[in-house]
Amino acid sequence: MKFSISTAAFAVSCFLVDSVSASYFNSCTPSNPGWWDNANPKHFYLVAECKTTTGAIKKTKLDLSKCIANDNGFMVARANGGFHGSCSGMYIESGRILTASCRNNDGVYLAVQRLSLEPFVSNQNGVLSCFGIPAVDW
């Protein structure tokens, strides 16, 4: 199999596009340590400015209640998890780690838990996303 310079350039350009569309932490800058919607307190957002595949910047907010569940006091990545209703003290460290204390099945709040957002939050052409659920414009 022969590779030409144009084939190699195409492969590299595909890799770059994929990296912008897939990696949140390499192509986005978090705006804050998490944001509450006072009008609708059942939402806790990750807000970030992300690069599109053309290099433009978009600012979106991702409702983390659509990405995380409370499993007997432990935060787990899960589509439409709704963790917010049974966890408190949410905070995002360095744009990468969500911390919170969550109630177990007995109603007791456990010690503060930490959950990395890296495995399931992505940048889809400038829009934050988890499990295919897109963020909304800020």
Image (spheres, helix red, strand yellow):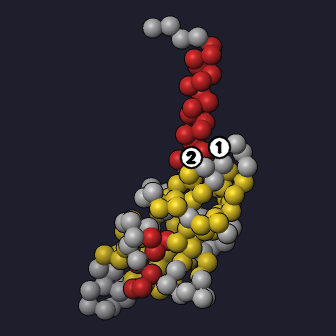
Q: Quadrant of residue 20?
A: top right
Query: Which residue ends up furthest to the top in the rendered image?
Result: 2
> Between marks 2 and 1, how big is the CA–CA gap?
7 Å
Tell me what residue is drawn at x 45 percent, y 8 percent. Answer: 1
Residue 70 x, y percent position in the rendering: 35, 77
Tell me what residue is drawn at x 52 percent, y 61 percent. Answer: 134
Question: What residue type is disc 1 on?
Answer: Thr
Residue 128 x, y percent position in the rendering: 57, 59
Circle 1 crowding by C-alpha within 10 Å: few under 14, some 14–19, many from 20: some
Which quadrant is the C terminus positioned in? bottom right
| Residue 79 visible in image | yes
Badge 1 element? loop
Q: Nearer the viewer, residue 26 or 132?
A: 132
Q: In the picture provided, is 43 more to the left or to the right than 48?
A: left
Q: Which residue is the site of mark 1?
A: 53
Indicate which disc residue 21 carries.
Answer: 2
Query: Which residue ends up furthest to the right in the rendered image?
Result: 56
Q: Are marks 2 and 1 in contact (CB under 8 Å)?
A: yes
Q: Is residue 5 above or below residue 74?
A: above
Q: In the picture provided, is 138 more to the left or to the right than 131?
A: right
> Which is nearer the N-term, disc 2 or disc 1?
2
Residue 59 x, y percent position in the rendering: 68, 62
